[in-house]
Image: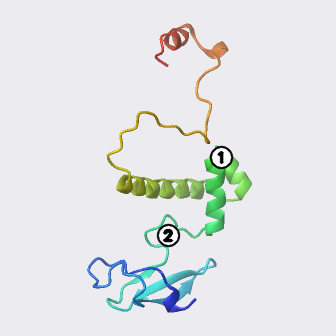
Amino acid sequence: MKDEDIKIGCINPECADYQIIGKNNTAIRRIVGKNKILMLKCNTCGKEFSERNGTPLFRLKTSPSKIEEVLNHIGEGCSIRVTERLTGVNRNTIMNITKKVGDHCKKIHDKYVKDIEAGEVQFDEKWAFVGKKDKNNVKEDKKKAHNGIM
């Protein structure tokens, strides 16, 4: 990859070229790790930063393809332990990935989704069974369910 191919601007808010892309103001400083993560340097202020800065991948050593695999399993409703067995990724790493990605999604959602009045919201493709089978309900639970409380 050439320096002119970089589509990431400086991350330093005090830099004159903060978040400016295409001005050839960032250069590849070095490539690190087995995932070949680019470490960049701003030519204006001299700040060094990772290409993953500001993304859920920041400070994760797991490959992007493995992270995608983990998220696909979690998104399909697999448990942490099942995802661990299927992907070979440690459960602590899985929880770290889902926390980081969830926090990142929340930030994006909160930034862009505002002032929406929704009469009905549907999430059709993903689902889960929540509740009790009637045979496992105690009398008090059956009464609450009948009254629409549960």
Report the disc number at residue 130. Answer: none
> Is 119 left or right of 125, judged from the image as shown?
left
Q: Amino acid at mark 1?
A: Glu
> Is 56 left or right of 44, judged from the image as shown?
right
Q: What residue is disc 2 on?
A: 59
Residue 131: image location, x then y, percent? 58, 24
Nearer to us of marks 1 and 2 is 1
> Is 107 left or right of 150, judged from the image as shown?
left
What distance separates the C-alpha of mark 1 from that of mark 2? 25 Å
* Residue under the point 58% across and 11% down: 138
Position above or below: 20 against 117: below
Residue 110: image location, x then y, percent? 37, 52
Mark 2 lies on a secondary structure that is loop
Depth check: 144 or 94 in front?
144
Quadrant housing residue 72 = bottom right
Q: Amino acid at mark 2?
A: Arg
Quadrant housing residue 125 = top right
Q: Residue furthest right?
A: 86
Residue 124 visible, this orientation: yes
* Residue under the point 71% across and 59% down: 88
* Residue under the point 64% across and 14% down: 134
* Residue under the point 38% across and 55% down: 112
Residue 100: image location, x then y, percent? 48, 58
Quadrant housing residue 19 = bottom left
Q: What residue is disc 1 on?
A: 76
Mark 1 lies on a secondary structure that is loop
Depth check: 86 or 15 in front?
15
Q: Earlier in the sequence, mark 1 or mark 2?
A: 2
